[in-house]
Image: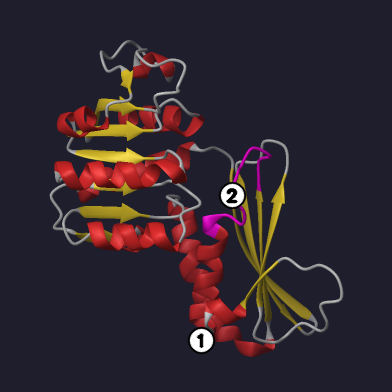
Amino acid sequence: MVKVGIVGAGGRMGKNLINAVYDNPETELAAAVDSPQFPALGIDAATHAGRPVSGVTITADLAAAFAACDVLIDFSFRDAFPGVLAAARAARKPLVVGTTGLEAGHLALIDEAAREIPVFQANNYSIGVAVLKKLVEEAAHRLGPAFDIEVTEVHHKLKKDAPSGTAITLAEAAASGRGLDPASAFCYGRSGMVGERPADQIAIHAIRGGDVVGEHTVYFFGDAERVTLGHVATSRMNFAHGAVRAAAWIVNRPAGRYGIDQLLVD
């Protein structure tokens, strides 16, 4: 059995990850970590997720968590991520990264760490989204510049970052298929007198409201026709199951940076 630890265990996604560890026949819960400010430090992690007592308590001790685990899954916060990554490097243990809102500096830290340990990072751990990414790249390539590309994402009102990492990933897939540079092609929303839409633009729009788990749509607008590719998540459990699957997969892999595409191949 692969011993898995969860960083961010006290949150909504943390509860889902704990349940996903129990759902997977290859994994067992070995540690649960949250911030020192988490009001329920010391409670049993499994009971926090609605399961029988496990004997694994939620603590703020990252070093102890890594010592107890074969691999850790991080779904905490962007500001906490460098510390989690540093602890993984110090423990020489694999890390699965699901924390959202990471910027270029964080990704550079992942590349640096991946020289020493296995790091699995994805903006979305849904297998359906992984397949959607491939479909978007193929559609962008085959439809060509005659079709304008727009990406929309919808999430619950509590989501802090925008646009979502998944929306950016899908836009990057479209740019790859079209042969465009994201730095110059991407447009984040529109306001005011923006003029006519450039043919080589890919726009990304974020919508927030209610309790929406996640909806992503990629539009290809042609003359007199429209192609639409999308994904709707109705539960966070699909992300949790994907992350736990990645954790079981990455154990015993050599140092390097891994993503959802490698998981699909296997």
| Residue 246 appears left or right of 12 | left
Looking at the image, what colour scheme do you see?
A: secondary structure
Report the disc number at residue 91.
none
On whether residue 142 falls in the magenta region, the answer is no
In 3D space, how far apart are the residues under numbered discs 1 and 2 (Cα atoms)?
A: 27 Å
Q: Position of residue 16 (x, y in %)?
A: 44, 31
Residue assigned mark 2? 161
| Residue 34 appears left or right of 67 | right
Quarter of the image where one finds residue 254: bottom left
Residue occupying the point 63% across, 51% down: 215
Q: Is residue 93 visible?
A: no
Majority secondary structure of the magenta segment?
loop
* Magenta span: 155-166
Residue occupying the point 29% across, 63% down: 111
Residue type pointed to by label 2: Asp
The residue closer to the viewer here, 161 or 257, is: 161
On whether residue 165 falls in the magenta region, the answer is yes
Residue assigned mark 1? 179
